[in-house]
């Protein structure tokens, strides 16, 4: 099973940057709640975070699936590499 260190560095860097932005958004929502902001604004921000997480998840899935296909030798068999990629896609709902 590959680790994230085996994924392309640019993909890892992009995912890390996106997750830091999501972290900032989450802190912003916490502040909105503490400041008694209106519910619709909070829900809009929560929807934004959900979309951002789905996007990062898709990028991770793509990187992992490509790794599985390009490096089947990292698995017990080429079939296992494909199974791992498919299982990841099924779990992510894509």
Image (cartoon, helix red, strand yellow):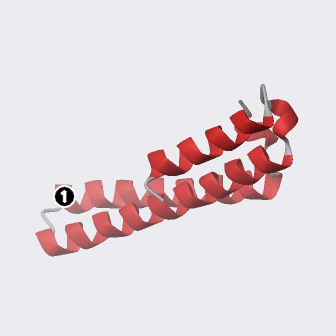
In-image side of 66 versus 47 (left or right) = right
In-image side of 36 versus 85 (left or right) = left
In-image side of 62 versus 87 (left or right) = right
Classify 6 as above or below 24.
above
| Residue located 62% across and 59% down the image | 59
Classify 54 as above or below 82.
below
User: Does the rendering let one see residue 38?
Assistant: no
| Residue located 52% across and 64% down the image | 55
User: Does the rendering let one see residue 66?
Assistant: yes
Using the image as rendered, state which of residue 77 and residue 27 is in the foreground: 77
Badge 1: few (under 14), some or many (20 or more) residues near its Cα, within 10 Å?
some
| Residue located 63% across and 38% down the image | 84
x%, y% of residue 26? 37, 55
Q: How many labels does the image show?
A: 1
x%, y% of residue 60? 62, 52
In-image side of 16 versus 25 (left or right) = right
Residue tagged 1: 33
Using the image as rendered, state which of residue 2 and residue 84 is in the foreground: 84
x%, y% of residue 62? 66, 57
Q: Quadrant of residue 13?
A: bottom right
| Residue located 18% across and 55% down the image | 34
The local secondary structure at tag 1 comes to: helix
**For the N terminus, which image quadrant?**
top right
Using the image as rendered, state which of residue 56 and residue 27 is in the foreground: 56
Q: Residue furthest front?
A: 79
């Amino acid at each position: 099973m590959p680790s994230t260190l085996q994924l392309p560095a640019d993909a890892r860097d992009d995912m890390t940057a996106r997750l830091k932005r999501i972290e900032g958004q989450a802190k912003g929502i916490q502040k909105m709640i503490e400041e008694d902001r209106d519910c619709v604004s909070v829900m809009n921000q929560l929807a934004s975070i959900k979309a951002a997480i789905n996007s990062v998840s898709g990028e991770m899935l793509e990187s992992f699936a490509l790794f599985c296909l390009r490096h089947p030798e990292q698995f017990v068999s080429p079939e296992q590499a494909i199974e791992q990629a498919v299982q990841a896609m099924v779990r992510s709902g894509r």
